[in-house]
Image (spheres, rainbow, N blue to C red):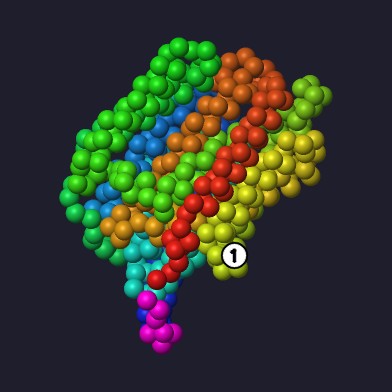
Amino acid sequence: MTTTSSSEAPGTRQVAPHLVRIVGFLVAVEIASGILQGYYTPIFSDIAVHLGIQDADVNWFEAAQLIVSALCVPLLARLGDLWGHRNVLLLSTAITALGSWVLAFAPGFTTFLIGWAIQGAYVVWLPLEVAIIHRRTANTGRQALLTRRSAAVLVGALELAVIIGALTSGALVESTSMTVLLMLPAIVVTICFVVIWFGIEDVPGRATGGIDWIGFTLITGVLAVLMAGLIVIRLEGPSSFLAWLLIVTGLVLLVPFVKAERRIEEPLIDVDLMATRAQWPVQLTAFLFGMSVLGAQIPLSTFARTDPEVAGYGLGADAAFVSTLIGVYVVSLAVGAFTLPLTSRLLTARRALIASSLLVAAGYALWIPFHDTTTQALVNMAVAGIGSGALVAALPAAAAAAAPADRTGFATGMTNATKTVGGAIASSIFAIALASTGSIDGPETGQAPLAGYLTVWAVCSVAALLAALALVAVPKSSFTDH
């Protein structure tokens, strides 16, 4: 039903100051998230020295956090719909703070690994924030539009904070102890908890029922077995019988999981909602997008560090240039996020999503013929980054717009869950493609073949192209404000 401007204006005037206040506090949360995501990358080698481990062992941190992230997002998203999104945001922040403090005082590898895995609870922050905004903008006449604009601001703040985190740790690593260095992000997350407590009002959840522990157990089994298979591939290579046995077993376990979820009145993962025409393309896009945004960053870094005089390819860059390359990529992510409202207005929200996916596809496709100079690398990453930034901001908002009011937390959370699973799968595929002396070893033990890097870029490009094709299937009405 079409409303007049006079009827919409009062609601808009009422929501504007309130929304600005909420988004302002949530920006603080995303600053903490960005610091976590950017702070550790420049100092991984220093962390390895601090813990007395090899650089290759750092890969286990990524694997552990991806597993925990994939498992906790559906549960926390469901809890958000039940208990209130602000309350679960507090819970996940407390868990993240605990993990961050464990890192600061971890005496060895095992304790650090546990702390790193626990810290992965922060992956649910952005979906919960989008759900909070979506809930607060109800009855404004511009719910989807305001949600998209707010998500763009949050993601822009996130990406800028990634740069701040990376620059801070790189600047301090030589001038302070590792314990003090690792305490700083823990302090930031702790402050973030206080900001949420006092800044975001408690609004009860709309969903009814309880926690689907049967579904949680089954999906935990599915993801745990699949991830175990992927880790075995990274350790033993694609010829491992155990690895493929685990992967096939994980896929087979999906059958009883889907059957069980369809029988439960309030399932943990609403497979029927996920299968709707408005949802499955968005969730599939998140999965395919995760392959590049989560899976390709380490290969890009190692390619840049490779000496062309030794390997016949690479940029021969030092750590400072790799930081510059990451900085350009993150800035382009922020540009993509901040310009999302404009591109959505010019192209429509649906077409903006499709265009963003095509930009990601183009950026990684450019790597295949153009990878010989630093200028080419910067251009490639900028193109892919603009599209990626828009997708990071748009996908949770798109999922919320296409979900019932009592399932927005679930829908937005699933975009992060599917993205994480996509990144984990891609990480294993890329490790195999780049393997030269053992798929989990670092680049110091041998040079990966150039064909492996070409495979990485091709997979990322094709995945983004498939995402664009999937988004064509989304009904135009899914992104229309009512």
Answer whether residue 322 is magenta in the image. Answer: no
Dividing the image into 4 quarters, which one contains the N terminus?
bottom left
> In the visual, does 323 lie left or right of 134?
right
The quadrant holding residue 176 is top right
Picture residue at 27% right of the left edge, 43% below the top: 268
Percent of width and height locating residue 237: 54, 16
Residue in the foreground of this view, choosing between 75 and 325: 75
Label count reads: 1
Of all residues shown, which one is farthest toward the left? Answer: 209
Label 1: state its secondary structure: helix
Residue in the foreground of this view, choosing between 145 and 378: 145
Of all residues shown, which one is farthest toward the bottom? Answer: 6
Residue identifier under label 1? 347
Would residue 152 be visible to someone looking at this image?
no
Percent of width and height locating residue 302: 66, 30
Picture residue at 65% right of the left edge, 34% below the top: 458
| Mark 1: amino acid | Leu
Q: Is residue 122 above or below residue 396?
A: above
Answer whether residue 6 is magenta in the image. Answer: yes
Percent of width and height locating residue 170: 61, 41
Picture residue at 24% right of the left edge, 44% below the top: 267
Q: Is residue 250 above or below residue 121?
A: above
Q: Is residue 296 above or below residue 58?
A: below
* Residue stretch in magenta: 1-7
Q: Is residue 400 above or below residue 77?
A: below
Percent of width and height locating residue 17: 41, 76
> In the visual, does 355 lie left or right of 205?
right
